[in-house]
Amino acid sequence: MDYNETLNAMTLARLSFYNLASIMLLYRKAGSATAVIENSNNIRDIIPDASQRLVELLSDCHKMRGRAEEELEFDLAHGIKPLDMANPEYPHRLAECDDAPLVLYYKGSANLNATRVVNIVGTRKCTPYGMDLIHNFVNSLAASCPGVLVMSGLAYGVDICAHRQALERGLDTVGVLAHGLDDLYPHAHRATAVKMLKQGGLLTEFMTRTKADKINFVRRNRIVAGMSDACILVESAAHGGGLITADISRSYNREVFAFPGRVGDPYSEGCNNLIRDNGAMLLTDADAFLKVMGWEGDASLAKARNEGIERTFFPQLSPEEMKVVKVLSDKGDMQLNMLAVQSGIQVNQLAAVLFELEMKGVVRNLAGGMYHLMPQF
């Protein structure tokens, strides 16, 4: 890390919150944050037509340096990496975007410049249908392209489901936050975030002591989009953050995919509309995705197959467990009492069988006491 360049970039980043386009243009023309700071009092030597507002803004840039120095000291003491655009660890895909952040703050173990990067986004009110889609997609992706990095926003619903499935299948996963790395929102996801630090990471453009304001969630979507080769929209209402990420992804010339849903379902409306309007390619499974992306011939795929990595891991099931699986497969979701009748297993024994099946990831207990068979079974 070039300490001086990083510090200067952090100072500029403080100025760029409401003037990002102008500051980024200046940075790219000058070639470094240090050059901008050194010419802050004669900036029109670099950009002759610089606005008066930009001139005045830069004339006060040294007032921001104290906060940047304080932040850098905190970061270095707490294992946070400030990544300015000159740092080779800065995500190169994101650096190509006109509105990329001058500085990112990162804590984790994943390579932000992984060969394959996808983001999985969607509604915060993910349904069992959406959860199943994520489960199947991530499982197949892990089996066929084990080096892929999964990006999302650590929010409720689709985001956290994507992160957790990636962790479960051994994929690195990075959450992009709408606040500084001295806090975590939502707090309910702290345990998952801790795991991600060892198998992925947490990333933000915001310094510590930054609150998770509404506008920050919109800004962070461009990082999720810009870092990725492709955007996967799982479920979305007619309006939502996932659609914003998909729209930004298209503006960055990234591939956009969406899973279709049943007509009339509120959290499939956004996906269906996007597919209808040619804003996203219809997605049904990971194999189709890999084919479109040209990743099916990837060396990591060949290695995975040569080493015998299976696409689906079927646990050993007892005869009673097999009965339950067959009933749910034939009849669909079912409550405990009806399942007992259909399977011929006593209710008290069936409760124990269902518990074991949940532990094996074969069934899921839904609201209302319904039991749902995971789709790979």
Image (cartoon, rainbow, N blue to C red):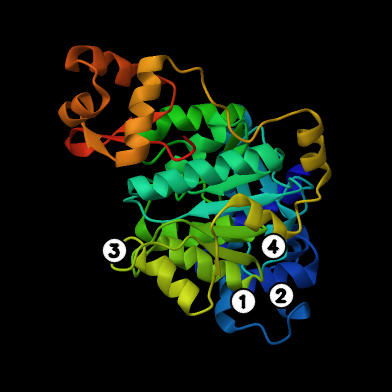
Q: Is residue 154 above or below residue 196?
A: below
Q: Nearer the viewer, mark 4 or mark 2?
A: 4
Instruction: For residue 213, say whether it is visible.
Output: yes
Q: Are marks 2 and 1 in contact (CB under 8 Å)?
A: yes
Q: Give the mark nearest the N terminus, 1 or 4.
A: 1
Residue 89, quarter of the rendered image: top right
Q: Which residue is mark 2?
A: 43
Residue 56, quarter of the rendered image: bottom right
In three-dimensional space, the C-alpha distance between marks 2 and 3, rounded to whole angstroms, equals 51 Å
**Residue 335: x and y, percent?**
20, 33
Residue 146, quarter of the rendered image: top right
Instruction: For residue 174, say whether it is visible.
Output: no
Q: Is residue 259 above or below residue 174?
A: below
Q: Which mark is residue 292?
A: 4
Q: Which residue is mark 1?
A: 55
Q: Give the mark nearest the N terminus, 1 or 3.
A: 1
Decide: few, some or many residues near mark 2? Use Cα within 10 Å; few <14, some 14-19, many ≥20: many
